[in-house]
Image: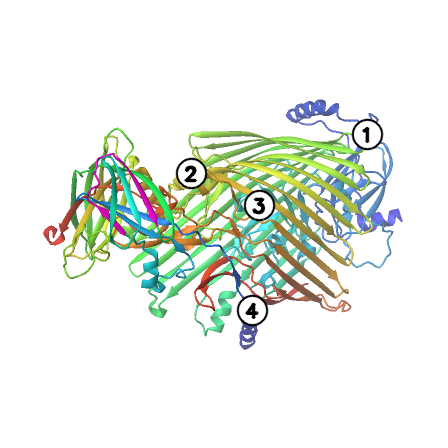
Amino acid sequence: MRDFLNRRFCTFDYRNHINTSLAMPYRRIFLLISTLFAALSLSAQTQKFTLSGFISDSANGEMLIGASIYVKNTTTGVAANVYGFYSLTLPQGDYVLVCNYIGYKQKQIPVSLKADVTMNIAMSNTDAATTIKEVVITADRNQEQVTNTQTSAISIPVDQVRTLPTIGGETDIIKVMQLMPGVKRGGEGQNAMFVRGGQGDDNLILLDEAVVYNVSHLFGFFSVFNNDALKDVTMIKGGFPAQYGGRMSSVMDIRMKDGDFQHFRADGGIGILSSHLTLQGPIIKGKSSFLVSGRRSYIDRVFKLAYGGQNVLPYYFYDANLKLNYTISDKDRIFLSGYIGDDVLNGSAGGDSSFFEGGFRLGNFTSTLRWNHTYNPKLFSNVSFIHTRFRYDVEAAIPGNSFLVQSRISDLGVKADYNYYRGPGQTLRYGASYTNHLFRPNVVNTSGQIADYLQSREGKKVYTHELGLYANYETELDSAWKVNGGVRLSTLLTTNKVFVHPEPRASATWLFHKRQSLKFSYAKMVQYLHLVSSSSVALPTDLWYPVTERTKPPIAHQVAASYNYNFQKLKTLVTVEAYYKWMRNLIEYREGAVLILNDNYENELVSGKGRAYGFEFFAQRTEGKLTGWIGYTLSWSTRQFDELNNGKEFFAKFDRRHDFSIVGMWQISKRVSFSAVWVYSTGQRFTPITGNFFMPNSALTSVDALPIYAERNSLELPAAHRLDFNFVIKSRLDRKWLIWTGEWILGAYNTYNRAQPYRVDIVASESGGYKYQARGLFGFIPSIAYNFRF
Amino acid sequence: MKHIKIFFAALLALTFVAGCRPEPIDIDIAPAPVKLVVTSQVVPGQIMVVGLTRSFSALSSGGNADTITDNFLDSVLVENAIVTVDHPGGTDTLYMITPGIYASINVLLSNYGSYTLRAKDVVMNLEITATTQLMPQVTPDSVSPYFEYLTNDTNLFVHYELTDIPGEENFYVVNFYRNNNDTGASLDPNTYFAQGQNKLTSFDLITETDFDQNGRLVRNREMTDVGYYDTIAVTISHISKGYYEFLTAYKRSGSLINQLTGEPINFPTNVMGGYGYFNAHIPTVRIFELPDYH
């Protein structure tokens, strides 16, 4: 059986290694670190050997991020890193290793360890057709989350959530994230995320390590991430590992698929709002692969057809992903990945005479070139070269006049990241990153008479240099305690100012029971840029600016503690977590600030402090016919600015006391599945006009009715709740001769048509006089989509 | 092509016809308590005038100026209030000229003198107190309009120069008016409460940072919406810091962006127990008949 399993599902690549000497500079660092932590290590000093390699999908060769490999009946093991690499050092002996990964059959591999061994492991997806009964021992895939030291992390199985209901049937990974505890959404349908009391720009969103500055299409209603191209999404809300920095509230690390190494494949879909197509396959079978994915909305075409060829809604968005990778040798692999996407509005008025033409174009471009290198079975590295750019152009023209306003942020960076697996449960991660930011806001080009009023200008060109050095060490103190400590030294060089901040990070796990643990974490995070926006809605005029001599970098300190229980029989992981976050140097806008085309925006900013605290409950079932999760958040988030609200502390705009979500995915039969989402959240905070008074202008020539506002964010809109569902009906599976498989997705958003309040209007009441009314944006919206694969 | 059209039409129908607009939800919001509102002006003829009105609920007019009735205005103007001003020469009672307007010619006007306003609305039992300082009159170094003749247009500018009062942090407001009709009627900047006579086209708020290192300010302000044969006026006033901040907020509240985004603006006030601003300054007025500058 062992031989069979090996032949069928594993690519054993036994190669005896002698621990080759490390490059001199690294050896010194390792020796130093090893000495420092030697006292903590209780591992036996018998002869040890290292088992290392990559864990991948047997069908397509995709590396399985986070797949775990453990010695059977022990807690000794390791999880594969984001490139699928693992390294496990054990005393000489015979072992049975157990490999687990969500959605895959557990695999047991007997190993006789007498020397260093390179072993690449290929795991089989549970969906993969197999005619042979395998010995499958009940997997315990949640155990890794109980035992590791990472707190406040959420990992989304991308394939499992692709059938979750969303507006218009567009699968949206960010909207799925918004269903998780600790993550608040902005207005209805918006993609802004407010994590543990943070602002929308406090989230570091990475696509294959490149920062994505604008995550939304259609003014925030759809995310820029095409689900077909994604492999893994992890969000960290606290206890940040030292390799991450630059934002205060969260890290969302999104990894694209590598592309199928074995077979050519096409996946696509046609929906109400957009269609998408992904092609992937081997370039050199087993060695190199590609993935190309594209998506375009056609709401403009739909309206054009419906209105007899008139361009009544000349708006569309598109995005495209590309990934290439090449395995140079057992030790070296390179990846090239890229993303481009734009929102385009290009309209005209006046028919053939066209007296007005105008619109905007905004979007991201990212590209990442990565090189994985395995120095030896214990040392793995990745070096990335990254370019990312976000730009917007707004233009308009009438006969004889035109204007074009452009803004850009462009990054060029390099990262070097090293993973040193010292022994079981002992990992040192260290590295450095450098990013050159170029900010170029408000470049204006005008012609004609309009140039008298809006003069052309080059805008400010601001360069900043952001540097990060980090080291993180994880070790097991004994069978119950694991600790992880690290520090990130972040530096920003900007005009006339250098900011240097050490950012300590620490976490610990106490496995006081086989399946229960308590975790604790502390992290300091510093942010060196912010989004200057005139409103909470994503607008093309929103601009990223660096911190400056006057606007100091916002800093957050967060502590978190969690209780984790792996209910093995229910295949459910339960996490209860509490957190407290202190923030300073927060930035808000002066009352009535006008930020558009304002190069002196710093005059409009005020600085203050804030705090956020709360309690989160999360129960997730990832296996079985019924999967899903229940999430609940009880939280508070406040701000205090001397210049706002008369200096009194006030609630943050997206402070919501209760957030509740139930997500269920039920596999009714092999062909039919049903998923439903019910969400409830306390209403969004707002500052209503509760009165007016008449006041003359400075010359006393006319009188205006000036508003009297309630205290800032003192009131709540009515609670928002809704039920969404999706039916997925797959094509018949018994038609083996068909290479085409398809599925229909029938869905409904806001099934019982409840308003999700986002604003308050004053309207005439039935009894005469006036009253306040809260309005929602979307009611019941049915959707239909068809996905296919061949 | 026909099938594609049918497909898209069906999609459109499914989305936008079957999609329902949810019913709005009625909510209760406690109205702001009614308070007295103060406005004031010192007329160059040495009269102190105080305007006294009441604030009102946002639901009173539905936020629409067209729905404001005379009865509603009558309910806002304060009649028969007890209004006094403590000034360097003693305490004087202001008399009602018309509902909501109180004035006295006996208030001693003294530069930098302290003035405390006390008012009581006996009908609604509302009281306020406000203290201000009379800012001295300033004289600009020069003020004059000029035209800029372009190929297809003619623009009007006002050139003005001002020297800062040395020694302390000073604030100024410069108002630009035109007559509010096209009949060539003369402009009267003294009819402050006679709305509709003049029109404020724009105003500049000036603070220390606007002056050069020699304490000089030279500025050319374009005036729009002015006729070629109109009369224009410019007033320059030395104002208090508090009133400067009030006018800054006032100016911001009128910006299009702010009105679109609805971000809250709280107006600073020196009125204890009320709204508005009790200010005292004496403007310097310059009037120009534009035909003289063609």
- Please identify, in this view, whether the residue under mark 2 or under mark 3 is nearer the observer: 3
Instruction: Please report, as a chain letter, where disc 1 is located.
Output: A
Q: In the rendered image of this protein, does residue A673 appear above or below residue B258?
A: below
- Please identify, in this view, whether the residue under mark 4 or under mark 3 is nearer the observer: 4
Q: Quadrant of residue A265?
A: bottom right
Q: Which of marks 3 and 1 is nearer the N terminus?
A: 1
Q: What element carries label 4?
A: loop
Mark 2 burial class by Cα count in 10 Å: few <14, some 14-19, many 20+ = some
Instruction: Please report, as a chain letter, where disc 2 is located.
Output: A
- From the viewer's perspective, tell me whether residue B1 is left or right of residue A602: right
- Residue A273: x and y in percent read 55, 64
- Residue A735: x and y in percent read 76, 69
What's under tag 2, amino acid-wise? Val
Disc ID at residue A462: 2
**Proximity of marks 4 and 3: CB atoms separated by less than 8 Å:** no
What's under tag 3, amino acid-wise? Ile
**Proximity of marks 2 and 1: CB atoms separated by less than 8 Å:** no
**Proximity of marks 4 and 2: CB atoms separated by less than 8 Å:** no
- From the viewer's perspective, tell me whether residue B42 is left or right of residue A512: left
**Proximity of marks 1 and 4: CB atoms separated by less than 8 Å:** no
Residue to which mark 1 is pinned? A48
Q: Quadrant of residue A243?
A: top right
Q: Nearer the viewer, residue A692 or A370?
A: A692
